[in-house]
Image (cartoon, rainbow, N blue to C red):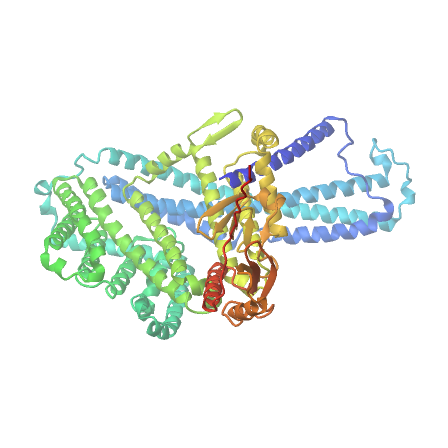
């Protein structure tokens, strides 16, 4: 935290300097603009430069003409606008019919989604046209400026045409060819300007047509929203008669068949009309399926030897055994971005494909009896599609929905209470079964409540509860299937080139896959939650509440702080830390091993990247929340004062840390001795470093101490270390014999270097012994203590075996008695 505060303090100080410079620049600009200045009228082109400037102007006109010509109304937008009124009129008719028969919440939500799809398409077109209009406006401004320059230059040829001109040149002095060249240049500029203005007028006209269509759509959406709010507020009121009071006599077989046939004909006609006008979208969808299927076919062949080496991947590889089904499920997910304002029949076909193939794929992974849930969902989904076909028959749809709710409730309760089902659960599926088992009674209870509401006439409540449970279950099945397919694809991709060339993948394959899948799962959960909110008609309310909380805040002087600002700031900082960890991980796993870097260089590079990314993340966080740098002037000044008076030691340690990273007198991993502390340098921070001592304790050493005080680095040049073992023998022992006995102990011993050769030195005459010292070198910086201990033991044993006494200090005391 201290290191990060240092970084922030320096950054804010820099911001203050930048802000001061900006303010001074702004003041200078303000004073300059307030003072009398020269007229904005362009300076005429000198006569001698007319020809050269005319060539430049011709190139500019040619570029402008090409640029403007390319900014026309796209053909797709032109065709779409031509077809859109008919589509809107058809949707208007369907909406009038829907609103005229007391629609349910489900019908209103479906109708609103259809109109929102139309509005989304128009907004996209309008945004594209507005971008082109801005580009054309900028080009028109350039041409006007160029035209003004040449008009001024031509006027200068004949000063009598401009009473304010001070030119004294005679018209006869201007060559006719130059005058002609200037006139033609001006004419070409005016032609290009007229072309650009015509293009802008065309774009504005089409934009106006889109605005008219948007106005009609907005009015209809407002009406639907009003009806939906009214229906939602009265959701506990019966909007249909109960089953026992319904007009069952009107439900004759002939009427039923006729209405079903009419509904199918209408839906097929709508689908056929959509297919004809959006044939390209179907081609794109088919192309996606072909590409995905081809990829799965190719991967299936490559995955076989991988599964043989890693049998635990057999479950993951199951999706590659059915490439077409996997391709269809993924393509249906992607179809949400392909088809807009799609008809009901197309949605039903896509849903059947996704649910059908999803159940087909998952049954290979889900062991009995959990597969019964998949088959139950598939059956309920087909009943739902039957209900959609009969949407023109309210009583028939209620009956089908009631049967659907009853069947689902009975099945779930039976599944929940069955002991045979629990006994058949495989050992690997127990955890999943227990989670599902706890949810079953809750889901079944909601479905029973929806069933009762349907029977008594609370159709909106029944559809809201039961329909949401069923449709969210279908969506969960599809999203889960897609997530498992992506899991298989990720597992395969991490085991083939080019990813297998990365050390990071080879050493951390499971971790990478787990992190990617965590992101995929959270994305699926987010999509599912948004969809459930839309099903419950709570999306606007929840988003409105989130927006209110997001914008809530307080003001301190000129600084406005909101919850959104805090969340955005924290998110940006968190992402910066994640990015730093990821970059350092890649450097350590794939970059450093491929480069011949000196000791400590890799740590220095990683540290620099870490703090640069953090500082960059802080800057992005400031920009993300929309703060102005000027708002930090007071804070930066206060921190500057704090640095000057109260943080000198911290700043000293900060600068010392930078010196240690770049100059590298000591490096991470070095064996160092700082005062009485001997150990290995584990890390170098911005404020302090950590030394791990031989006894396992960590010593926190300020960076300034490593720079200003004496530090013994045992491994600065290399890992060689000399070990000195002093010992003594009794007086009267032959020194040559001692050398002959002790030197061989070190020679040839594991861990002892032969160059330099071990030596036994007679170093002096002590008070009680002849002093010797065994000197040898080792390249094991971590095991030298153990080696020294072993050598001391060998010296003792050797001297003891040779009968050589190892003396201890002795003192002779003589007592002198004085005679009286």
In the picture provided, is 617 more to the left or to the right than 67?
left
Image position, residue 451 (x, y; %): 14, 45
Residue occupying the far left of the picture? 244
Q: Position of residue 535 (x, y in %)?
A: 28, 44
Q: Is residue 307 above or below residue 132?
A: below
User: Residue, x 55% and y 52% (percent of image)?
Assistant: 672
Q: Quadrant of residue 45?
A: top right
Is 159 situated above or below 506?
A: above
Q: Does residue 199 appear in this view?
A: yes
The residue at the point 66 percent across, 52 percent down is: 65
Q: In which quadrant of the rendered image does the C terminus lie?
A: top right
Is residue 404 toward the left or the right of residue 566 in the image? left
In the displayed structure, 746 sits above or below 469; it is below
- The residue furthest top is 557
Q: Position of residue 320 (x, y in %)?
A: 33, 69
Which residue is at the front of the view, 315 or 127?
315
Name the residue located 73 percent from the left edge and 44 percent from the top edge. 146
Number of numbered discs overlaid on the protein picture: 0
Q: Quadrant of residue 653?
A: top right
Q: Is residue 180 visible?
A: no
- Most foreground residue, 521 or 39: 521
Q: Residue furthest front?
A: 820
Residue 12 lies left or right of residue 528; in this view the side is: right
Along the viewing direction, whichever of 104 and 72 lies nearer the viewer: 104
Between 626 and 398, the one nearer to me in the picture: 626
């Amino acid at each position: 935290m201290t290191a990060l505060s240092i970084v922030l303090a320096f950054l804010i100080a820099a911001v203050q300097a930048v802000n001061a410079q900006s303010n001074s620049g702004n003041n200078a600009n303000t004073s300059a603009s307030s003072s009398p200045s020269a007229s904005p009228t362009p300076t005429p082109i000198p006569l001698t430069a007319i020809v050269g400037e005319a060539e430049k102007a011709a190139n500019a006109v040619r570029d402008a003409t090409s640029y403007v010509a390319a900014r026309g109304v796209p053909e797709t937008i032109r065709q779409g606008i031509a077809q859109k009124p008919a589509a809107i009129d058809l949707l208007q008719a369907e909406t009038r019919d829907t609103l005229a028969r007391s629609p349910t919440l489900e019908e209103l939500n479906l109708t609103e989604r259809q109109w929102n799809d139309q509005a989304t398409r128009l907004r996209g077109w309008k945004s594209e046209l507005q971008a082109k209009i801005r580009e054309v406006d900028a080009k028109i401004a350039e041409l006007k400026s160029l035209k003004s320059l040449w008009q001024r230059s031509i006027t200068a040829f004949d000063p009598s045409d401009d009473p304010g001109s001070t030119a004294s040149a005679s018209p006869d002095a201007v060559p006719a060819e130059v005058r002609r060249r200037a006139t033609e240049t001006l004419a070409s500029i005016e032609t290009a300007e007229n072309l650009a203005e015509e293009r802008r007028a065309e774009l504005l006209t089409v934009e106006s047509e889109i605005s008219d269509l948007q106005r009609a759509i907005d009015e209809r959406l407002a009406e639907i929203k009003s009806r939906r709010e009214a229906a939602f507020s009265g959701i506990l009121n019966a909007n249909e008669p109960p089953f026992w009071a319904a007009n069952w006599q009107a439900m004759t077989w002939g009427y039923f068949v006729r209405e079903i046939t009419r509904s199918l004909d209408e839906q097929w006609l709508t689908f056929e009309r959509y297919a004809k006008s959006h044939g390209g979208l179907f081609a794109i969808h088919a192309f996606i399926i072909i590409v995905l299927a081809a990829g799965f076919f190719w991967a299936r062949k490559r995955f076989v030897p991988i599964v043989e080496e890693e049998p635990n991947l057999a479950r993951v590889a199951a999706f590659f055994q059915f490439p077409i089904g996997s391709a269809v499920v993924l393509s249906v997910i992607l179809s949400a971005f392909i088809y807009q304002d799609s008809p009901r029949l197309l949605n039903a076909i896509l849903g059947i494909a996704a649910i059908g193939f999803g159940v087909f794929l998952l049954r290979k992974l889900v062991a009995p009896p959990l597969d019964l849930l998949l088959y139950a969902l598939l059956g309920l989904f087909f009943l739902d599609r039957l209900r959609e076909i009969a949407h023109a028959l309210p009583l028939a749809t209620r009956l089908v929905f009631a049967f659907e709710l009853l069947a689902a409730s009975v099945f779930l309760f039976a599944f929940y209470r069955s002991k045979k089902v629990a006994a058949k659960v495989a050992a690997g599926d127990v955890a999943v079964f227990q989670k599902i088992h706890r949810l079953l009674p809750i889901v079944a209870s909601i479905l029973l409540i929806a069933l009762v509401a349907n029977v008594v006439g609370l159709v909106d409540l029944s559809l809201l509860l039961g329909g949401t449970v069923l449709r969210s279950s279908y969506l969960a099945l599809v999203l889960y299937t897609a997530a498992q397919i992506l899991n298989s694809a990720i597992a395969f991709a991490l085991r083939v080139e080019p990813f297998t060339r990365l050390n990071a993948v080879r050493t951390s394959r499971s971790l990478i896959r787990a992190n990617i899948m965590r992101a995929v799962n959270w994305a699926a959960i987010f999509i599912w939650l948004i969809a459930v909110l839309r099903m419950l008609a709570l999306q606007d309310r929840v988003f409105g509440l989130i927006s209110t909380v997001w914008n809530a805040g307080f003001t301190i002087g000129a600084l406005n702080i909101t919850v959104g600002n805090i969340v955005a700031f924290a998110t940006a900082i968190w992402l910066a830390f994640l990015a730093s960890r990821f970059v350092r991980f890649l450097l350590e796993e794939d970059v450093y091993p491929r480069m011949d870097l000196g000791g400590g260089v890799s740590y220095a590079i990683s540290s620099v990247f870490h703090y640069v990314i953090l500082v960059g993340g802080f800057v992005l966080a400031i920009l993300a929340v929309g703060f102005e740098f000027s708002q930090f002037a007071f804070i930066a000044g206060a921190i500057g004062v704090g640095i000057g008076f109260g943080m000198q030691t911290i700043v000293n340690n900060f600068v010392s840390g930078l010196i240690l990273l770049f100059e590298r007198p000591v490096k991470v991993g070095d064996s160092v001795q700082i005062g009485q502390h001997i150990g290995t340098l584990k890390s170098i921070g911005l404020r302090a470093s950590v030394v791990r001592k031989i006894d396992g304790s960590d010593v926190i050493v300020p960076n300034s101490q490593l720079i200003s005080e004496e530090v013994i680095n045992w491994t600065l040049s290399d890992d060689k270390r000399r070990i000195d073992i002093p010992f003594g023998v009794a007086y009267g022992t032959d020194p040559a014999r001692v050398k002959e006995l002790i030197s061989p102990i070190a020679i040839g011993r594991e861990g002892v270097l032969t160059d330099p050769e071990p030596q036994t030195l007679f170093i002096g005459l002590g008070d009680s012994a002849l002093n010797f010292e065994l000197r040898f070198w080792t390249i094991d910086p971590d095991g030298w203590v153990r080696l020294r201990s072993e050598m001391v033991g060998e010296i003792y044993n050797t001297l003891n075996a040779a009968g050589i006494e190892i003396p201890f200090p002795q003192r002779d005391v003589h007592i002198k008695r004085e005679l009286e």
